[in-house]
Image (cartoon, rainbow, N blue to C red):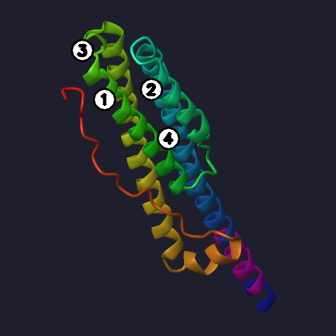
Amino acid sequence: MAMIMIGVIAVCLAGWGVSVHRRLVTMHENINNAMGQIGVQLSACFDALTVLLNLTRGYDAHESQTMIETIKSHQSVITAKSKPYDVLKQESVISETLGRIYIVARRYPKLKADENYARGMNALDRYEKMVCTSRLIYNDSVTKYNREIRRFPTLLLAGIFGFRQREYLEAVEKKTDMRGV
């Protein structure tokens, strides 16, 4: 009888362990998926920036070429395995390039009035909003995951299974809309 009880307890503990592991894997993959979505949105931002840079080429070829070289040298692909620091780095490249595009547009009013420029800026705004939404989803997923691995009794197995807390994407300062400048 004692052996049966020990067997039942062992099966229950094993089932609980499998359940905890599956839940943590799911949460971990949700975080990876959210980071991957951020990467997709940032890639789209870089594509929109490239279109804008090609438009500025006709107005200020040197500045445009410098910005294109800056993007090429600093752009990296954000994947599910990327860290929040990588995202912040990419966002700063986008922000810096946008600031420089605004300066060129201020010097060349015809560029600001160009319909393609306006479409490019609208597309960039849409992508930036999608990045913002993806950041919220990522941080929400990290919150749920971090909370779960710190809760008793899950914390007993989380460390054994190799689950560690994940970093949040810190808030970035609001970008100034310089289109009207």
Q: Position of residue 111 (x, y in %)?
A: 31, 13
Q: Identify the main secondary structure in magenta.
A: helix
Q: Disc 4 designates what residue?
A: 38
User: In the shown orientation, is residue 26 left or right of residue 107?
Assistant: right
User: Which portion, as a residue range, is magenta?
Assistant: 6-16
Q: Position of residue 53 (x, y in %)?
A: 45, 21
The front one of 70 and 76 is 70
Quadrant in the picture for the N terminus:
bottom right
Spatial distance from mark 3 to mark 1, Cα to Cα? 11 Å
At 30% from the left edge and 21% from the top edge, which residue is drawn? 105
Q: Are the residues tagged 3 and 4 within 8 Å (C-beta)?
A: no
At 59% from the left edge and 33% from the top edge, which residue is drawn? 72
Q: Disc 3 designates what residue?
A: 109
Q: Are the residues tagged 4 and 2 within 8 Å (C-beta)?
A: no
Report the amino acid beneath label 4: Ile
The answer to which quarter of the image holds residue 122 is top left
> Within 10 Å of the Cα at label 2, are there few (<14), some (14-19), or many (20+) other Cα atoms?
some
Spatial distance from mark 3 to mark 4, Cα to Cα? 33 Å
Which structural element holds mark 1? helix
Q: Are the residues tagged 2 and 1 within 8 Å (C-beta)?
A: yes
User: In terms of sequence position, does the residue under pointer 4 or pointer 1 come before the other?
Assistant: 4
Report the amino acid beneath label 1: Ile
Report the amino acid beneath label 2: Glu
Which structural element holds mark 4? helix
Q: Position of residue 46 (x, y in %)?
A: 50, 30
Q: Disc 2 designates what residue?
A: 63
